[in-house]
């Protein structure tokens, strides 16, 4: 069984920071607004259920469309890449590739992301 201490040693992650917890707001307009705020566009409503975006393909496609010529596009690119890392490496779900809304709020301020466990 993998323990929290194992994860800390393998990934070099801290385990005593702020917790990543589930959002209490599950409405679709909130998720849509979060996507617009973070990525400049909204995920199609039929591509998510409750507080999850069902496929990582939306983030991967958005990442590929970014032209890295200005800071806004670079930030969107990095945010998409970070979400993909969260979902595939750190918080993987073997049943299906989904992105939970709670991870999006971590991307608001990259200077503070190191405070989370």
Image (cartoon, grey):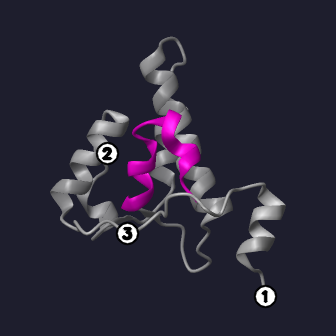
Instruction: Write down the residue under mark 3.
Output: 22
The residue at the far front in this view is: 16
Q: Relative to 113, is 48 above or below?
A: below
Where residue 1 is drawn, which disc sits there? 1
**Residue range highlighted in magenta:** 101-117
How far apart are the two marked residues, 2 and 3, measured between alpha carbons? 16 Å
Screen quadrant of the N terminus: bottom right
Instruction: Write down the residue under mark 2.
Output: 35
Q: Earlier in the sequence, mark 3 or mark 1?
A: 1
Q: Residues within 10 Å of mark 2 (few under 14, many from 20)?
A: some
Q: Position of residue 89 (x, y in %)?
A: 68, 60
Q: Quadrant of residue 31?
A: bottom left
Q: Is residue 66 in sight in this rendering?
A: no
Q: Quadrant of residue 91?
A: bottom right
How far apart are the two marked residues, 3 and 1, measured between alpha carbons? 24 Å
Within the magenta stretch, is there residue 106?
Answer: yes
Q: Relative to 100, is 114 above or below?
A: above
């Amino acid at each position: 069984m993998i323990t929290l201490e194992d994860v800390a040693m393998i990934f070099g992650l801290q385990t005593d920071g702020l917790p990543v917890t589930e959002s209490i707001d599950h409405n679709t307009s909130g998720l849509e607004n979060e996507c617009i705020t973070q990525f400049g566009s909204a995920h199609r409503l039929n591509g998510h259920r409750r507080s999850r975006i069902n496929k990582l393909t939306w983030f991967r496609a958005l990442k590929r469309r970014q032209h890295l010529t200005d800071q806004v596009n670079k930030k969107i690119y990095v945010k998409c890449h970070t979400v993909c890392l969260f979902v595939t490496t750190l918080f993987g779900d073997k049943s299906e590739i989904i992105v939970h809304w709670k991870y999006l709020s971590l991307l608001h301020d990259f200077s503070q992301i190191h405070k989370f466990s």
